[in-house]
Image (cartoon, rainbow, N blue to C red):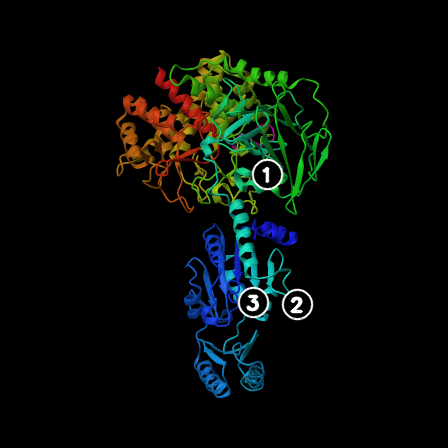
Amino acid sequence: MTAEALPADLRRAIVQLARTPRLLVACDYDGTLAPIVEDPEQARPLPESVGALRSLAGLHETTSAVISGRALRDLAMLSRLPGEVHLVGSHGSEFDVGFVHALDANAKSLLRRIEAELETIVDGHEGVHLEVKPASVAVHVRRAAPETGVMVLDRVRSGPCTWDGVQVTEGKAVVELAVVQTDKGHALDVLRHQVGATAAVFLGDDVTDEKAFARLTGPDVGIRVGAGESLAQYTVEDTTDVATVLAFLLEERRNWLHGDQAVPIERLTMLANERSVALVTPDAKVNWLCHPEPDSAAIFADLLGGPAAGHFSIKPEHGSLPLGQRYLPGTMIVETRWSRLLVTDYLEHDLAQHRTDLVRRISGSTNAVITFAPRPEFGQVPVRLLREREGLRVVGTSEPMVLRAPGVDWEITSDGVQETARAVVRPREGAPVLLELRCGTDDLSEHPISETERRERAGTYWSDWAQTLKLPPVQTDLVSRSALTLKGLVHAPSGSIMAAATTSLPEELGGIRNWDYRYCWLRDGALTAQALVSVGSYAEAEAFLGWIHGVLATLPGPERLHPLYTLHGTMLGAEAVIDTLPGYAGSRPVRVGNLANQQVQLDVFGPVVDLVVSLANARGTLTDADWKMVQAMAEAVARRWHEPDHGIWEERHAPRHHVYSKVMCWVTIDRAIKLGKQFGRALEPSWEPLRDTIANDVLKNGWSDEVQSFTTAYDGDDLDAASLFVGLTGLIDPTDERFQSTVTAIEAELRSGCTVYRYRRDDGLPGDEGGFHLCAAWMIESYLLTGRRTEAEELFAQMVDAAGPTGLLPEEYDPVAERSLGNHPQAYSHLGLIRCAQLLSQ
């Protein structure tokens, strides 16, 4: 039987249940997993049910269990269920993790007395037998003549059932007498507590199962097998239906978790228009788009929650793998190509600030299937789709949203909560199918400008800019793509720059190191703007410094700068977890917001001043406003450089005196002095002595004779790739033996093949992470500064190889699993690649 044969309301309940963060699947054995048979010793479970229970137990945050009245030993031998499925016997008095009730002397005595009395009652009655368990005795009359069964059970009920301390459980043709308080409802509660289930489903057919149904609340689902009154919300006919229910639940749960189907991170391609970003999979599925801002809630979050979290897909009707995907050269327009189908995607330019418009153009000579499944607010807002002559209207969102698709005939389906539109179209020669998703408006009318002209305008915006860049001869095309990616992370309305386009892409598959990078860090933004200045584009740096001026204007003093802000320069709200999303490849939790907002990171001033220096040198002038900013940064350092902080890596434990943070404080003062002298500005008399004081402090307290290296912080001998900045910034000469020794020590401790880890210390979080592309870039620069060009070239070649097919890099790389990790695309990775290509070209 297929899932479609199940009642519609039950299917809807299973779909919702499958999306709970931690699921408990529990069921009875006889009459549920196994059909009722004449000989109870021949009751075998249906193989389909066993397979589904086992597969469910193998999923993330999913527990399977069988709760039976049979003794645990007999249940295990008869069911032959795999070890992944928990077994609970004797109506909950026996758990496979150990007998939870230790019987005292009185209970043991009572159990012996019950057994002796029952043996007397059943003696000589054919078809009646006793089942003796560790804490109970069951009287079975199923195989006895009806009148015999009634007589025996009446004697049991009027006799030992009335004794003090006896717990009675009635079932079909069975009465069980226990010396411990137990029932299937209690067993369900114990299991729920043990696994922290946020919802449970229980299936059963017997009167003893009603105690389990009685414990179900809220999102829980109860399913009665067979006819009869029941506390369960839903009913199915027989054990075959049970197998169908379990298989359907498995499919929905697996699709929701979708770990096996997760697209490799580096193969995701970014669309951008300097206000919005979206991600497209290699087979033309838009699986990430937020609105109204890139740091707002997602409309399509398939990336973090599978199809149920929203997507916008186009593929050939008769499926085949795409032949390839590419950016149109020098643009952010993406083409996905099959043999007879071409999908072209881009985000529109020149729109009002509250608008996000995604254009999808389908051309070719074969049928294409379109699936439109918007799920606003990360899928937490139910939506309806209304068909209109010019397309679809999305109803139920706080922001208006329409999909203009003239001539497309949509079929709309519902899973009971959300609606999805599907259509089959066939583009004709010279007449492509156009889909225009318009967020922030309810206007479905024809655009006054033709799609061809808008596509050309979008392409020209990027290609005209790319042609102005000064690119190195090493990896020219990849550097150009990296520069375009950095510009795509710019938020033009505010001038801020995103650290990455996504949230919660994991640093370890299945792990909890999942962070939200859709905000503007002062450090990341300054380094990104500096990289763009280095290739000849200054406007982004001008706008970013303007954004910082705006942030500073809201503070009592520059030393109160936070490490990061929203794209519009406001404080972040509290970090939150979206428990309804399973995360990329089952990596939970999915986080929104970032607690690093509350940290002290004293290194942030250095990159800002370094950016001012780069911009002033590039344009040949230093503005009064920028000099005032440099003075503010220097003032902040003067007040706070001696404090401990949380460091560049934002570790969530007690602050330390980080070497990198001290070095960046030194950079702030050093660059301020040099900039002032270069452009004839008056210097604070205290700056030069302060510069020397900080440098001496680092050299004295940051160096370890034990490990022959500059360390992470003053209080230990652990190493950190960021400590390479002692030489990279010029605090000590790169020819200094201490720097050369530091490079060697960090290489030995933190480099693993083609990547470099940040550190190896315990940072207070469980799990591991990949190596950082940015750290590899630092190592490449350090190799060059210490005369090791061959090693630099080899490591750079490996870094290049890690880029995806369209030239994008996420944050990290796992050299063991040989796959990318972390948020994507990551500004750090691309600015590091640009820097290395420039240095290798010199």
Residue 160 versus residue 746: which sits nearer the camera? 160
Q: Is mark 3 in CB contact (under 8 Å) with mark 1?
A: no
Q: Which element is circle 1 on?
A: loop
Q: Which of marks 2 and 3 is in front?
A: 2
Q: How far apart are marks 2 and 1 (CA)?
A: 39 Å
- From the top left corner, tell me how far across and down residue 721 is, in percent: 36, 33
**Label 2, on which residue?**
229
* Magenta span of residues: 552-562
Amino acid at pointer 3: Gly
Q: Name the residue under label 1.
A: 310
**Is 373 drawn above or below residue 617 in the view shown?**
below
Real-space Cα separation, disc 2 to disc 3, in angstroms: 18 Å
Q: For this rendering, which residue is in front, 218 or 763?
A: 218
Res 727 visible: no
Q: Is residue 765 left or right of residue 416?
A: left
Choose the circle earlier in sequence order: 2 or 3: 3
Amino acid found under the numbered disc labelled 1: Gly
Q: Mark 3 points at which residue?
A: 185
Q: Is residue 808 visible?
A: yes
x, y percentage for residue 485?
Answer: 50, 24
